[in-house]
Amino acid sequence: MAHSLPLIAIAGRPNVGKSTLFNRLVGKKLAIVDDTPGVTRDRRYGDAMLAGVPFQIIDTAGMDEGDKESLNQRMLNQTREAIAEANAVLFMIDARAGITPLDATYAQQVRQSGKPVVLVANKAEGKAAMHVMADLYALGFAHVAMISAEHGEGMADLFDGLREVLGDAFVSATADVADDDGASEILMGISTEGSDEDESEEVKYETRDERIQIAVVGRPNAGKSTLINALIGEERLLTGPEAGITRDAIRLPFFFEGQEFRLVDTAGMRKRAKVQLKLEKLAVQDSIRAITYAHVVVVLLDATAPLEKQDAQIAALIEREGRACVIAINKWDQITRGKQAFLDELRLLLGEHLAQLSGVEMVPVSALRGEGLDALMHAVVRAYRVWNVRVPTGMLNRWLEGVVQHHSPPLVRGRRLRIKYMTQIKTRPPTLMLHCNMDKEFPESYLRYLVGGLRQSFGLGGTPIRLNLKASNNPFVKKGKK
């Protein structure tokens, strides 16, 4: 990865406060923080600022060795890759605990990397950690900063340390024009609405020149991290046979056919009753936040463990948040026979359990073998375009006239429900206003009939449709006193 700004990695043994410092420097609570050791597993990049100087920061997993194929060893390998990539390293220790044998071991490994190092003694607020001052220089680092990442103390010393080890490369750093978080409106899903007066006779797609954000969600061990690694073409995320490896929602840039995307890996989402630990609750909240900020959500199903109730609940959450949706069926290479029948059955189950996302595209993939990835990305682009669709008012009302003639609204308490007209008031997702009488008594069944017709007639499969009702003014009803 090429970086125009200085790239600095935070390293150290587990539970010394690396993620707390990361959040402090980026100015947001991006990384999950908990007292449990080993919370962070994947390396996370962020845009940081210290004393007005911008730079890139990497949060890493705790340096903790294990067997060759163990999770701890794979996490350590991720940390070593971050150190090798960085321009400088913040080697962090816990000042309250003092210098431990593990600190000395990992300090030697960091020194062998040949990178400039600032020794950061965290949790040094007050006088409680002054006893460790004499031992700090025994680790062999010339530059030391005593800080409290939680309370923001000692940031001036940290700045001085970075300026000493990086020199002009740090002080003269300038912010990139295309800042990762400069498109806050994009992340928040805020859209600029077009005019309702547009009477052109064709459906428009109000897509814009932006980074399309894709969140990959699903149950634990469905292969989300493996899929993202296959898409970006490198082992960027930690993977393995263990369920629940991913905890933080990790955002990665990605290009496909000239279009820029941002892929978001998320923690597996289990049934609410099974989520007991605080750490898992935080990870699930991070996944839900990723869905809220996404443009398109890819629900990854495990072909060897077909659709379960939890998958339908995840898709229902996507519909409530108003995000476009694509369903990817992973481990397709393990289905040896009856593949078309399998897809037909899955499509039938989705129609029964989640009619709100009727017509969503289903794409078989094999993340391990890299199969079906282009088809998945093409489906994502199509879902994004549909999410941005705008149907002209004239076309909508000609369609509405035919639909009402074919199946008129029912009687309510002996009165005929009447629809005056329909107009689209926003996109992302398509939201329409239905002007009618007795708006509070309109039956849900007829509204579902209208939504189904809209999907079929205008090709709106795979995206939520919002249908709002507004009572038309009755000129014969006398207005009450103000």
Image (cartoon, rainbow, N blue to C red):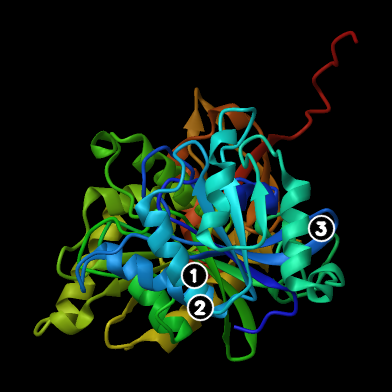
Q: CA distance from mark 3 to mark 1?
A: 60 Å
Answer whether labels 1 and 2 touch (C-beta < 8 Å).
yes
The C terminus lies in quadrant: top right
- Farthest residue to the right: give it: 482
Q: Position of residue 471 (x, y in %)?
A: 70, 33
Q: Which residue is mark 2?
A: 113
Q: In the image, what residue type sits under mark 1?
A: Val
Q: In the image, what residue type sits under mark 3?
A: Asp
> Left of 396 or right of it: where is 220?
left
The N terminus lies in quadrant: bottom right
The answer to whether any part of residue 405 appears in the image is: no
Q: Which residue is mark 3?
A: 196
Q: Position of residue 300 (x, y in %)?
A: 33, 66
Q: CA distance from mark 2 to mark 3?
A: 61 Å
Kind of element beneath mark 3: loop
> Left of 445 or right of it: where is 419?
right
- Closer-to-camera residue (270/117): 117
- Closer-to-camera residue (472/390): 390
**Can you say whether 100 is above or below 110 in the image?**
above
Determine crowd level at label 1: few under 14, some 14-19, many 20+ residues with C-alpha closer than 10 A. many
- Can you tell which quarter of the image residue 424 is in? bottom right
Q: Which residue is mark 1?
A: 110
Which label sits in the foreground, 2 or 3?
2
- Farthest residue to the bottom: give it: 257
Determine crowd level at label 2: few under 14, some 14-19, many 20+ residues with C-alpha closer than 10 A. few
Residue depicted at x 19% and y 81%: 340
- Closer-to-camera residue (236/126): 126
Q: In the image, what residue type sits under mark 2?
A: Ser
